[in-house]
Amino acid sequence: MRIPKGGLARMAYALPMAALSLALMGCVSMMMHVVLSPMSRYYMEHPFNTDHKPIYSILATKFAVNPATPANKDLVLAILAEEREKALSLLESGADPNTFLTDTYDKMHDRWTPLMLAAWSGDIQLVQALLDKGANVDAYADFFTVQFTALNLAAGSGRLDMVKLLLAKGADVNRERGGYSALHSAAYQGHQELAQLLFKAGADKDVVISALKADASRNASIVDPLPQNKEAVIRANRAIELIGNLK
């Protein structure tokens, strides 16, 4: 897939669930022609995606793990395929719950952990097992301007019970980079009950509102905006209103 000159620039600030498209588009927006990987192409075509399934299907075709053992790679593959019993068996056999991905498409998911993958897919039983085996509840992965945690991913996909579990296990409600905290993810996707829960757990409203205002401003300022930019402005303003009403 080739993107014509100016196309990426116009999309540069349309945010998806975890802002991967934002980072990608901001990175390459000054290039005239860009040939995208399967992962980048998917995020560009679905900038507001919250469905883990197509992402996991692509991710399963290109990744390594660290520590690089067969058991660790099999654990990740089992989670990507949503094969819970196999994943649980691998954990019992000694697979590392804190292994992390490397060498993924465009490094977009480098340092993602089994806990992050299981939290996004909504498998509470597997998340509990990973935590029981010592998974770091606050493990994070940075990609340019954004940061991902299990809590952030669960919040963005509207998984209320998962968020409750992660908070009960001590997840940092205010871990963020550039304002993209779990509260940002929940509010941006319109999950009001989840946003209220995070706020009651101590989520900082001000840092998120500041980030959302910046998002809305950048998208609104783009000349000849794409539909994704217009949608991003709408979502950011709705999220600002939602957060402003939290009590």
Image (spheres, rainbow, N blue to C red):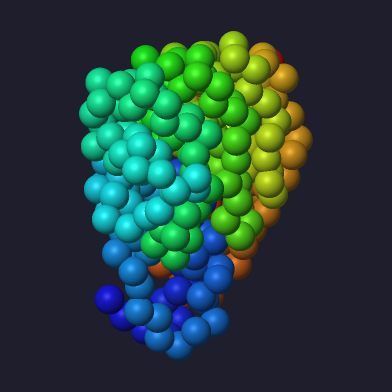
**Relative image position of residue 179 (x, y in whole percent):** 68, 44
Q: Is residue 57 visible?
A: yes
**Relative image position of residue 17 (x, y in whole percent):** 45, 44
Decide which of 240, 124 is in the foreground and name it. 124
Decide which of 22, 89 is in the foreground and name it. 89
Instruction: From this view, report whether residue 200 is shown above or below residue 221.
Output: above
| Apparent side of residue 197 relative to residue 10 in the rendered image (left or right) | right
Quarter of the image with the C terminus is top right
Residue in the picture at 44% in, 60% down: 103
Q: Is residue 44 visible?
A: no
| Apparent side of residue 2 relative to residue 107 in the rendered image (left or right) | left
**Relative image position of residue 99 (x, y in whole percent):** 49, 39
Residue in the picture at 44% in, 65% down: 106
Residue in the picture at 29% in, 49% down: 60
Decide which of 217, 40 is in the foreground and name it. 40
Residue in the picture at 58% in, 46% down: 141
Instruction: From this view, report whether residue 31 is shown above or below residue 86.
Output: below
**Relative image position of residue 2 (x, y in whole percent):** 31, 80
Total numbered badges shown on the rendered structure: 0
Q: Residue furthest top?
A: 168
| Apparent side of residue 190 relative to residue 199 in the rendered image (left or right) | left
Instruction: From this view, report whether residue 93 is shown above or below residue 213.
Output: above
Instruction: From this view, report whether residue 54 is shown above or below residue 159.
Output: below
Quarter of the image with the N terminus is bottom left
Decide which of 186, 111 is in the foreground and name it. 111
